[in-house]
Amino acid sequence: MPQPIPARHKGFNRAEIVDRNFIEFVNEWRGEPHARPRDDEPVLPGSTLDARGFRELFESQLISRHLDLMARVLRVQNKVFYTIGSSGHEGNAMVARLTRHTDPAFLHYRSGAFMAERFRKLPGLDPIVDSALSFAASKEDPASGGRHKVWGSKPLWVLPQTSTIASHLPKAFGTAVAIEQARRIGHTLPIPGDSIVICSFGDASSNHATAQTSFNAAAWTAYQKLPAPVLFVCEDNGIGISVKTPNDWVAANFRDRRDLDYFHADGLDLAQGYAGVQAAIQHCRVTRRPTFLHLKTMRAMGHAGTDFEIEWRSIEELVALEATDPLLRSAAIALESGLHSRESLLAGYEAIRRKCFAAAEDADRRPRLQTLEEVIAPLAPYTPHAVIAEAQRADYADKRAAVFGGADKLPEQLPARHLALQINAALHDLLAKYPESLLFGEDVAQKGGVYTVTRGLHKAFKGARVFNTLLDETIILGLAQGYANMGMLPIPEIQYLAYFHNACDQIRGEAASLQFFSNDQYRNPILLRVASLGYQKGFGGHFHNDNSITALRDIPGLIVGCPSRGDDAATMLRTLAALCKVDGRVCAFLEPIALYMAKDLYEAGDGQWQFAYPPADQAMPFGQGRVYNEGAQDLVIFTFGNGVPMALRAARAIGEKLKWQTRVVDLRWLVPLNNDFIAQQAKSARRIIVLDEGRRAAGVGEGIITAIVEAGLGKTPLQRVVGADTYTPLAGAALLVLPGESDVVATADAMK
Ligand SMILES: Cc1ncc(C[n+]2csc(CCOP(=O)(O)OP(=O)(O)O)c2C)c(N)n1
Ligand SMILES: [Mg+2]
């Protein structure tokens, strides 16, 4: 017969009930205690956890629990701004105890106990004070400076996470690979060489494409007998918000995966579960193989403070669930082992409650972010003098000579050449300049990329620095973040812009946000190259001619450069690498495929779109555009990429037809746009054409026009020649969609 549910268990506020359950459980405990164990003796007979370990773990669990309870109370008073809690997941403290504070951790949002336990590893840190500052969005929050409630810590190697499900798994995998690769390229790691990477997530999240690709990539790596010491910790509470995970699904799904070694541990019971956690961590550390720890947890108090479970679950189910609260089990162990009396346990429980509330009240009195400047301070650091100095630094002549086959064979001594060859030379230079740089992507190694832009790099720098990845853009960008986290300079390639969109969140939600959410304590510089844009004739169709730059333009903090000619590409790559090295920026370099092999400007054979390779000490100042036919005022064409040679040809036709002098402005830097430069060029224009190969609804042109209008120059006659809002079709029909030279001439003609 099921027991009737007592009225006091039927309340709406489950936090109060969970709290009361603990006190009642302790008060009503009537067991027989064992002889109190010494610190180094098993907490209960047969357990691999000793008494001291238990005591500390239990305290970490209680800290986490009281932070949750405090958050529920103070949220309604507007003193705390986050209520997604860790209640029921406190067993994850065991993972923290059995790993080192230098094992990088990318954590699930239910990691309060993990954090409290990891705090023990360094003296002088207080998890309650730090967490309270974070809950209160205080400017003094050491994790994010009040920007988000994240689990993060610079000294404890907890890299802060945003809350997009599973988005942290690719970079956790990448960091594990990077730890091992460092040795192969002679790079000094910021952490010990036998570190492992910890990455936790929920059961529902394990189904996410981003999670699955990370498991797959880790297994793909281990299958080739390459090390990938990542510990995936699946905290299985059987539910994701309100959707139940099918019974036993996580075990069934992961138990027998090839090259992903499965361990199980009961996270609801410290005495029982410790051995399983120990085994998994030991296995990962020693074998350097991807390891999957299935940690049983439960979720108490709903998904967040806003989730009133009683409205959508039966009371019987809730009460049964709450009876499995791991803190009740820890209380039982504490009492059974003789480590605590009922009184001392409750006194300890209340003391931690008081500490949490006091810390929260104190945090509430601390300053919060007050100005926009404060909010965005860590987003996009830029130190211009240091960047240009680094970009122009050319103290690697010997290495250059070795790479190019002799001091007399340097690329600047060769005749003018086209874009693809100049990018290729510039990449040789960058890899020579930065021994910690790595170039990787699909087909970039022996084949040298689809367009031979990376040809020769694999031979020159060998497979540890120039290599093919598995076919997954999310993983390519996860690897990039991992290498960056370990102090390397990743230069990933994405084969086409359309395939960047496939993995965009790894830049938008993760890489570009790290400086912001860590208050600039962590940086993950990346120099991402993407073969981009339209008009190319080798491979037709939309996905090889994607002209949408918009998805990059609105990513806060990202830098986007787009060259139209080879010499600019080289000087720009140097600046982008310097922006990575000096300011830790995430940069994208859009290489116009259609211009890779372009040699001519006006007529076949004129060779006017080939340029000499700039010597190694030349670099392009960030934001600087290029102006053709300076001083011309009848018409100014603002453009970039393929639009530049197109505009120059159109300018010649316009000159013949309308007798106008046309200035062509190549912006070169598309994110952020240099509004002052645009305004300065627009000021003296009688007419303006914005030539944008992106799309009408959302390209680059709107940004250019906004800069012109905001500079008070909106009265200048202005027209836009821009791509249509459609996908790009195959063959000649592509030119119906993309702007053409004759469109520019016709638009000018209509402005007479
Ligand atoms: C990409 C993405 N989709 C949806 C969400 C909304 N969301 C937040 S938590 C969550 C459930 C996660 O469940 P689980 O992985 O089991 O973790 P738990 O909360 O149970 O610990 C969902 C759907 C999200 N944050 N990110
Ligand atoms: Mg879950």
Image (cartoon, grey):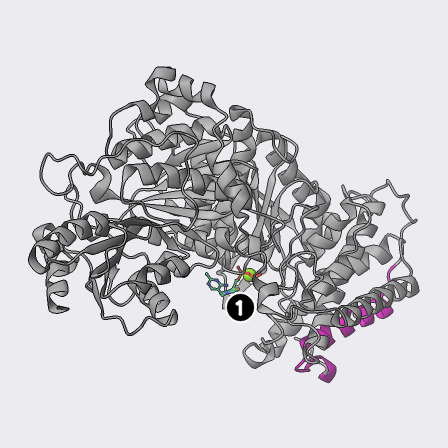
Q: In which quarter of the image is the C terminus?
A: bottom left
Note whether 381 is above or below 399 in the view shown: below
| Residue toward you, 218 or 526 | 526
Mark yes or no: residue 217 visible.
Answer: no
Mark yes or no: residue 75 visible.
Answer: yes
Quadrant hosting residue 554: bottom left
Q: Residue at x 46, y 45 (%)?
A: 478
Report the span colored magenta: 7-31
Is 100 placed left or right of 335 in the picture?
left
Q: Quadrant of the N terminus?
A: bottom right
The kind of secondary structure the magenta stretch mainly shows is helix
Note whether 437 is above or below 24 in the view shown: above
Report helix, strand or loop for mark 1: loop
What residue does disc 1 label? 241
Q: Residue at x 49, y 50 (%)?
A: 511
Tell which residue pokes out farthest to the bottom in this image: 7
